[in-house]
Image (cartoon, rainbow, N blue to C red):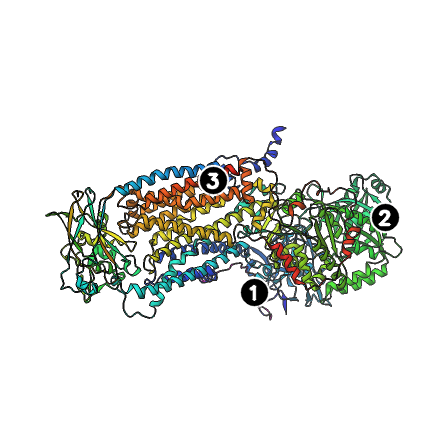
Amino acid sequence: MKRFVYINDDESSPTHGLYCDNRISNRKYTLFNFLPKNLMEQFSRFMNQYFLLIACLQLWSLITPVNPASTWGPLIFIFAVSATKEAWDDYNRYLSDKTANEKQVWIVRKGIKQHIQAQDICVGNLVWLRENDEVPCDLVLIGTSDPQGLCYVETAALDGEIDLKTRVIPSACTGIDFELLHKIKGVIECPNPDKDIRRLDANLRLFPPFIDNDVCPLTIKNTILQSCYLRNTEWACGVAVYTGNETKLGMSRGIPEPKLTAMDAMIDKLTGAIFVFQIVVVIVLGIAGNVWKDTEARKQWYVLYPDNDPWYELLVIPLRFELLCSIMIPISIKVSLDLVKSLYAKFIDWDREMIDLETDTPSHATNTAISEDLGQVEYILTDKTGTLTENKMVFKICCISGNFYGNEAGDASKDKRLLNAISSGSPDVVRFLTVMAICNTVIPVRSKTGDIVYKAQSQDEDALVHAAAKLNMVLTNKNGNILELRFNTLAIQYEVLETLEFTSDRKRMSVVVRDCQNGNILLLSKGADEAILPCASAGQQTRIFNEAVEQYSQLGLRTLCLAWRELKEDEYEEWSFMFREANSTLVDREWRIAEVCQRLEKDLEVLGVTAIEDRLQDGVPETIYTLRKAGINFWMLTGDKQNTAIQIALSCNFISPEPKGQLLLIDGKTEEEVGRSLERVLLTMRTTASEPKDVAFVIDGWALEIALKHYWKAFTELAILSRTAICCRVTPSQKAQLVQILKSCDYRTLAIGDGGNDVRMIQQADIGVGISGREGLQAARAADYSIGRFRFLRRLILVHGRYSYNRTAFLSQYSFYKSLLICFIQIFFSFISGVSGTSLFNSVSLMAYNVFYTSIPVLVSVLDKDLSEETVMQHPQILFYCQAGRLLNPSTFAGWFGRSLFHAVVVFVISIHAYAFEKSEMEEVGMVALSGCIWLQAFVVTLETNSFTILQHLAIWGNLIAFYVINWIVCAIPSSGMYTIMFRLCRQPSYWLTILLMVAAGMGPILAIKYFRYTYRPSKINTLQQAERLGGRFLSLGNIEPQQRLIEKEVAPLSITQPKNRNPVYEPLLSDSPSTRRSFGQGTPFDFFQSQSRLSSSYSRNCKDN
Amino acid sequence: MEIASGPSTDSSAARTIPIDSSSTVLYEFKQQNLPACKPVLKPSYVITTFLLLGFIFLPIGLTTLCASRTVVEIVDRYDSECVPGAFRGNKVSFIKDSSLPKNCSRILKVRKHMKAPIYIYYQLDNYYQNHRRYVKSKSDQQLLHGLNSSNTGSCEPEESNNGLPVVPCGLIAWSLFNDTYTLIRGTKKLSINRKNIAWKSDRDSKFGKQVYPHNFQNGTLIGGGKLDPNIPLSDQEDLIVWMRTAAFPSFRKLYGRIEEDLKADDVIVVHLMNNYNTYSFGGKKKLVLSTSSWLGGRNDFLGVAYISVGGSSIILSIVFLLFHIKIPR
């Protein structure tokens, strides 16, 4: 499908009005559809449907045990809260849309320049922009102030990259006069709107009098997209091709799928179980009630049952019980959870220890709903560059035509020999520096103070240009195609003829330049070693460069090979023709260009190798060490070279050096090779699974592709077995696939990255963390959490994640406990009220019980800390309790269930006996039982709270006081059912004695059990608590769990596993190591579908949920 | 020079230290660093707690038990005894036959001295005043405002009779208890004070002073007692007491008070009208004379429960103590 855009369209053209206008709308609702749409959305949740059903049933007065308000009130409240939140968000979206839509822009209509609102731009309009204007819609450039037709845009809002990008007008439009641009006519053939911001395959044809003999191809380089800013260019003019919500930005705007935490899933599961339990209770009691009615109640003449019932009478009693038991599922849990979750997120935002002081970026939780998942992470998949490292590239050392430069400190720019060579003008060195300085797309900008500032798209290029400048080869100016260099004091000019761009497939880039001094045409190339060295001319020895690359990457440096070649005039002319042709193909353009480039990039003379250092971020090794100790597995997914990746992995505690660690390499170019290699690795993994050895596998992108395609099952097993993996040279989609594999094995994954290539992985993972770093904000924007530095991950997981998990575990189970408590009492009461479904409690109390009395004390559990932050940091193994879901699972839930049953028995038995005979007044007994519940729940919260701040005391005891105050107020109203009840009760000594008895009988056994467990069967958390609070020195935690992957042993003393990055000693770690080889050798053919062993092994690793 | 360099260093310091003292609490809250007390379940604390609990509960238990035991109670079940021998096989037909005389005499012996006031209760067993159909079947509005109130939907099936509304409506009022008792000591009738047996708050604010019984017990189906249509509801204390529904199937309701002491070995003859039908569902009727203590009537439960909770917590503390000595942690 194509769209045809007629430039300077007027009403008569065929496509006028076919496309939408430029009105941007991010709104979800309009004023009219808000209510129905929002209600629809809320009712798509099971819980809400359930509550609505209950509320509707309550309207039938025959069956309702209580006033319908007791359900309608909270229900409407809950709905109002979330609807208000939605409405507020939508209103803010509307406001921001409005400012964007009403922005004034200059366009040309009917040949006249007009000032209109941005929302009135139509497809085909000519839009004029001035410097620093925001681009209102997607435009195809047709003219700029620059004579070459260049302009610069900042695309930060689009892809987060902060450098300036060059955009150029299409060749057909070059040389059109400024005045004539108003009248330009033509047609642009472009694809239907899509969201690919790096691609536009379109054509432009101009009409007379601007006729160009040919169809002119358009690429993304000829466009400026919505939300970019025009910089360093006086004006630019373009044709609107996509407008409104159909722009590239508009199309890529999507509502991401809401993520559900493991905890939410567990709560849902428990809710389901309670629901089933409730149905069973209802059925049993319903039948019992009907039987009792027919056998007993008909004899009770005062009940006056009619002799012939209508048919629905059979249903009345079960439905009454359904309503009576409906509070088993606490209506407040959703609201409470939403509330505390947003508070968890706020705690992350507020945390001062997670502010990056260098850039002053605080951490931010974009997704407020998944904090608990942070505490349950099992796998962390991390990008390397910019995530583990600073992404601050610094040129370190180099090898120029066989000479290694770089002084003892490893700094070539201070190496005397190199400086001497430069000052003496050694031709090799000069060429090398020239390539460093001009084989790139860097734009030098002269700032006001006269300094030269480089605007580079890639950090590597930036580092090279800076290094060249330091070595006296300064790129001073770029004026159209003319580059100006200053070498020592000499000014040199080059004319850039072509740029053969970098793509991730080609892994190299080249420029063709003409030396303005002597007119020679030169091809300058730089790229990865495997992309450059094979193109070296036949005569040249590349062994020395191979060695250099090897050696540098052993040091964890990023290497680039530089090469050059002189071109003959006619060779260039011939090639240039082909290149232009390839550039204008519409089909497979990228592939064609690559092929043409290939033809030129041959017989290169390799000049040397540069090594760029990307320093590790502060605290990375410590963070990884702590998190691995916490039982989290790390996978590193990088686009970088294998050796570099392994070195970085070593230096940041990712893997242990040889005697302790073992690296298994999966490689191969064909299906069989990869298969064999995979099989060997699997075998080794299985045999070493029981040993306390740190085994990791290394795989590159190519082998991964094959493994994922043909050996999915085997690879999945490998993924389960392996605690550590390094995947090099992987593409963004492969990163996402790996996340998918781990997720399909039911692991909680966290993906952390900083660049655009990590976005897919971040979105795919259960938790996406973005580092708001140098590669822009793209990853941070797509992520659920954005942090400034990698080291904050430790705090994010161990402190915020863990606390969130613990708190939610308590809160959710407690919510069920208190609902079940009151429900059990109602059920017990039904046995002494003729199984007729009478409610012991009055409506007001029931409603207030769930909404006020019991929800406030528990809300302050968001401040509870079972262990101090320092203790958790020192003993990260404790995270295991969260990972394995020890604090919220069916068995802990059973404990709470039992507790509520026990408390219900205590309250019920004591109140019916203490208030027997002449005291057995219904309202009074109801209030006695209710007070008992309130007191008990206050003590339960107290007992389960680990640390009391002033707020907790206020909430727990204040709530208890509030209970009495509220009830006294209600009791003072003559028309209320419980008029004077509470005053009477509070005057009776027997009331207070009863309450005291309930508290003692209810809490005594629970305190005793808790104390017994705490002292004689302590969990590791208890042990740490005792150590922390009693101040005792605390030596070793030991193994938390025998099955728990032997973490503590593996990463015992810190000092051994921390080789310094700068250590130049070559450590044979990979395939060359004979011991590794041997362990590969003796493999029997592995049946790829041998699923049993996979199951058993995964089982043993999954034995952790009790 | 130093002054000039001041602001630049301050900017970094300001980032880390909050200065305003009023915001300190808020700051600590945001950092989750509010000062907290972190209790530990130390053996000494827990053992002391249980020991203390025991030593508080035992005396309370003994006191309440004593209080309960000082209450003297005479309970006499009369429902089956008060049916003439000929009708023992079919009690329901006896009670339903209005032509038969329902009077009956019982002889009670006072075992211990009973101090005034002595409360007279009637006790019903297996009587479900808490049944869902029953407990809802009244209209608070009507009881207060009488015929002016039309809000009597909840009174079904005793809402109206012969097209006229019933006051007081509903099953509770309809099934009003109507046995009566006359107590004679020796030859002298004991005076029973039947005033102020209902809650004052009920008489004042729940039952209307201007509301008179209307069309009550006029139907074909007659439930319990009748009401004098000339006395307003607020003075019909039997009704008010009856309408405070009981939460359990076995309950006592106040009938009246004897304002003089009964001596030990006094013999009291009770003349009663055995009107109320409990025979159809096998319910028991009892007459209870009881004194009262600060805790109310005779009920050993609290005392026994306190003693057992106190006792078991002392045992528990001893067990924990032994544990602690055996396996010190």
Identify the amino acid type marked 1. Answer: Cys
| The one of B204 and A921 positioned closer to us in this rendering | A921
Q: The residue tagged with tag 3: helix, strand or loop?
A: helix
Would you say residue A250 sits in the magenta stretch? no
Query: Relative to A231, is A669 on the left or the right?
Result: right
Q: What stretch is highlighted in magenta?
A: A13-32
Q: Are marks 1 and 3 in contact (CB under 8 Å)?
A: no
Mark 3, residue position: B320
Q: Which mark is residue A20?
A: 1
Identify the amino acid type marked 3. Answer: Phe
Mark pair 2, 1: CA separation: 60 Å
The chain ID associated with circle 3 is B
Determine which quarter of the picture holds residue B69. Answer: top left
Tell me if residue B150 comes above or below residue A350 in the rendering: below
Q: The residue tagged with tag 2: helix, strand or loop?
A: loop
Sequence order check, earlier mark of 2 and 1: 1
Q: Are marks 2 and 1 in contact (CB under 8 Å)?
A: no
Query: Relative to A1060, is B2 on the left or the right?
Result: left
Determine which quarter of the picture holds residue A358. Answer: top right
Mark 2, residue position: A401
Q: Residue A297, how many percent across, how many down?
A: 29, 63
